[in-house]
């Protein structure tokens, strides 16, 4: 492919923290020019978040670094009339505007989708919120953990003894961001560009809950927290080995038979309790106990190699640092140099096109570093930009 799919597209990113920035993170890596609009002086709240206090104090917190490489930063106070006028000028040349304010905030500023699409009918306006623009819960804050709970996801996560549990990362934010990026990419390919996209993080997360949702809607069976068990099959769970856990998913009959023979459990193949998938599911406790007794005698990496060689899906449960070693080998880790010489590594997108991982040419931007250049492209001269800065508009 000679150019990235979204090369030449102009995106205005008015988002903060994660769901919106993560959406625009995908678009930047796909080739779009992403202009991040931030409040003068403070910018995206994520600039102050993360586990490195020095970076947070510099307004370049780790939480900001992760989803913002490849973007330009422009400071613009949208409470000022001059700031609103400048945004409208930017909108006239934009293909997409993305915001994740609470519903009604942009309209309250006089910058709602009707107004901005009046400036540019081809504009794709994407609003990301916790529950959608006109939902009964629309006015509530869209914090990830709140959305995880309200979506039902936490209720089915954990073990029968220890639940509910949240996912170990902000899954509602990231799924909401991915859903927005997908919708925007599709809208950019429409025969007649333009429109309003309404992304609910709750609805986006529930859409990924697939079988848990459809089993209830179709069969009336409510999902329950099952820990590391796969309730659709057996044996399919996490087991302890001599040096750590391993996942085994022997979902097919031939996989079960190969697993049983390799573990020296051939006798179980003639046991009516384990004859079919349904039998094994009904008697999973006894089955897992027999498997566990064998797996605990050898290291996880040995079982992993042997079982996969037989066609039985198996994989160790890795720590995040160990998993990142694989991602690094796959080219999914980017390194950028921040102002002052500090090196920062961030994950890319997980996507490859024509065999190459997607990348961007620049790192996460310092607050407002591109303001003068972007406003200069609108035709403002140095004196006009200086007056805007004095007024606090930029």
Image (spheres, helix red, strand yellow):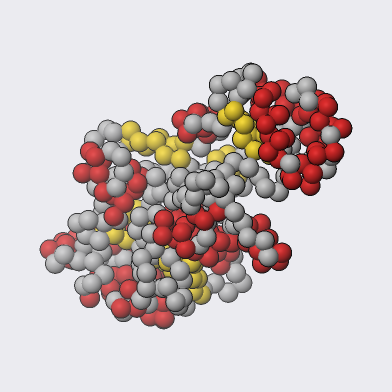
Q: Where the C terminus falls, by quadrant?
A: bottom left
Q: Is residue 90 left or right of residue 300?
A: left
Q: Position of residue 275 (x, y in %)?
A: 84, 39
Q: Is residue 361 left or right of residue 372?
A: right
Disc tally is 0
Q: Position of residue 53 (x, y in %)?
A: 24, 40
267 or 66, nearer to the observer:
267
> 350 above or below 389?
above
> 376 above or below 331?
below
Q: Quadrant of residue 377?
A: bottom left
Residue 42 shows in the view: yes
Residue 180 shows in the view: no
230 or 168, nearer to the observer:
230
Q: Residue at x 26, y 64 (%)?
A: 76
Given the current orientation, which residue lies at the most extreme right position? 270
Q: Residue at x 68, y 34 (%)?
A: 288
Q: Is residue 136 left or right of residue 382?
A: right
Q: Residue at x 59, y 47 (%)?
A: 226
């Amino acid at each position: 492919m000679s150019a990235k799919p979204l090369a030449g597209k102009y995106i205005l990113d008015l988002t903060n923290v994660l769901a919106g920035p993560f959406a625009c993170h995908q678009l930047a890596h796909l080739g779009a020019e992403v202009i991040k609009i931030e409040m003068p002086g403070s910018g995206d709240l994520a600039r102050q978040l993360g586990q490195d206090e020095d970076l947070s104090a510099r307004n370049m917190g780790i939480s900001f670094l992760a989803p913002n490489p490849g973007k330009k930063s422009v400071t613009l106070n949208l409470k000022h009339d001059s700031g609103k006028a400048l945004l409208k000028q930017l909108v006239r040349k934009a293909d997409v505007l993305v915001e994740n304010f609470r519903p009604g905030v942009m309209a309250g500023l006089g910058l709602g989708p009707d107004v901005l699409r009046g400036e540019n009918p081809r504009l794709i306006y994407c609003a990301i919120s916790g529950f959608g623009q006109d939902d009964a819960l629309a006015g509530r804050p869209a914090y990830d953990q709140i959305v995880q709970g309200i979506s039902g996801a936490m209720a089915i996560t954990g073990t029968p003894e220890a639940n509910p549990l949240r996912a170990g990362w902000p899954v509602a934010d990231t799924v909401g961001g991915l859903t927005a990026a997908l919708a925007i990419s599709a809208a950019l390919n429409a025969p007649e560009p333009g429109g309003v996209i309404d992304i609910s993080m709750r609805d986006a997360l529930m859409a990924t809950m697939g079988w848990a949702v459809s089993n209830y809607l179709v069969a009336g069976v409510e999902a329950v927290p099952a820990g590391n068990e796969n309730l659709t099959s057996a044996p399919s769970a996490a087991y302890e080995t001599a040096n750590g856990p391993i996942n085994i998913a022997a979902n097919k009959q031939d996989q079960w038979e190969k697993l049983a023979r390799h573990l020296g459990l051939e006798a179980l193949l003639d046991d009516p309790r384990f004859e079919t998938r349904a039998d094994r599911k009904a008697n999973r406790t006894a089955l897992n106990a027999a498997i566990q007794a064998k797996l605990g005698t050898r290291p996880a990496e040995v079982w992993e190699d042997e079982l996969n060689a037989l066609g039985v899906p198996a994989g160790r449960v890795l720590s995040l640092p160990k998993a990142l070693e694989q991602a690094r080998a796959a080219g999914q880790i980017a390194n950028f140099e921040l102002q002052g010489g500090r090196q920062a590594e961030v994950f890319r997108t997980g996507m490859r096109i024509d065999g190459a991982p997607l990348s961007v040419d620049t790192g996460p931007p310092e607050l407002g570093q591109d303001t003068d250049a972007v406003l200069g492209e609108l035709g403002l001269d140095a004196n006009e930009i200086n007056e805007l800065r004095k007024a606090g508009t930029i």
